[in-house]
Amino acid sequence: MATLYGRSWTRDELLRHVGDITQVAGARRVILREGREEGVEAILFRTGSGFEFTCLPGRGMDVSSAEYRGQALAWRSATFDAHPAYSEPEGLSWLRSFYGGLVVTCGLTQAGAPNVDEGEPLGLHGRISNLPAYAVQADGRWDGDEYEMWAQGKMREAIVFGPNLEMTRRITARLGESRFFIHDRIENLGYATQPLMLLYHINGGFPVIADGSRLLSATRSARPRDAEAETGKEQYASFEAPLAGYKEKVYIHDLVADEAGTCVTALVNEGFNNGHGFGFYCRFRPDQLPVFSEWKMMDAGTYVVGMEPANCHVLGRASERHNETLQFIEPGEVREIQLELGVLDGGDAIRALDSRLAALVSAHG
């Protein structure tokens, strides 16, 4: 049964109280109509718990805004949810349409820093987040006394004489819960082996990120990406107040998986709301996404911490190829990725997760 408004409900009990399920929850398709967002398709999810988020079929089925009882989870940039027509894939220009958001997907054949791989210039983080979806669906259904809402769409990264990769994404959430699930299915529809690079850019912002906030993770070690990250590396998991001129720091974590074969990381603000505490977590499988990077950016205005599970590092495809860590997808091959993101509401939930992660490190560190 669904738990809603402090009690459990059967399907019949709840439907007797409403004209339609959309009174309390659902997934609704809309079109954005302002400035550079003009024409971007969006799907608005409400789970009934106070958890709401926006999926953007017009931008790779990624998740932009998200909030819980009016409290924002994700950092949002000044670019808005720009239409893909405004995308600039060269060099660092991907940043001109990087709206922040809760989940931005990087890939499918390039993720990470701009580089030149075998003569091909590659821009920051690839093309998938600027590809509009097709075959889009959004709906909900009862399964006994549980109600599930979902959205699905397909993105094709293709070029004549080159890759032909298709990602099918399905996002699901349940009535009364404060979490959602992403299931990605990537298929090589072409007849040649292709590079496969995937990075999930999960961007926490204020009020989750504030002076005294922390990253929770079962980390054995965190390696600085460069000399900038070397400075203050002992504080990789703690966050300070915004500082104008701050330079980004990136850390690559060695994580311990739990008994279910998953890794959980979280961003938490234990002092939020007079010590009530608030945050969110991400759960993923290291056998699918073996690399986890942390993006710590404490600059004023660009005040964000990124959790980035990936199948690659953040230096780009040429680096992956040179280091012999570049993954490939064969003709007809299918790869599947699952992620779960959810709210941590209150100190008890935060402390329980922190204790579990600490125990994992103690047992396997």
Image: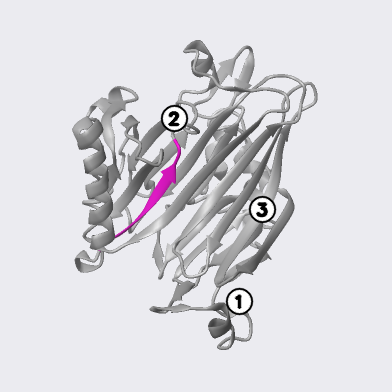
Residue in the image at 45% along x and 38% along y: 285
* Left or right of 67 in this view: 154: right
| Dots 2, 3 in contact, CB < 8 A | no
Q: Which mark is residue 281?
A: none
Label 3 or label 1, whichever comes before in sequence order = 1
Q: Which mark is residue 22?
A: 1
Q: Label 3, label 1: how many angstroms apart (C-alpha)? A: 19 Å
161 shown above or below 138: above
Q: Is residue 93 visible?
A: yes
Along the line of sight, the residue nearer the viewer: 210 or 57 = 57
> Splitting the image into 4 quarters, where does residue 30 fall?
bottom right
Residue at the spot of label 2: 290
Label 2 or label 1, whichever comes before in sequence order = 1
Q: Secondary structure at mark 1?
A: helix
Along the line of sight, the residue nearer the viewer: 102 or 264 = 264
Along the line of sight, the residue nearer the viewer: 123 or 237 = 237
Q: Secondary structure at mark 3?
A: strand
> Splitting the image into 4 quarters, where does residue 363 fall?
top left
* Left or right of 127 in this view: 4: left
* Left or right of 51 in this view: 34: right
Residue at the spot of label 3: 152
Residue type indicated by callout 3 = Gln
Residue type indicated by callout 2 = Pro
- Magenta segment boundaries in residue numbering: 277-285
* Left or right of 85 in this view: 129: left
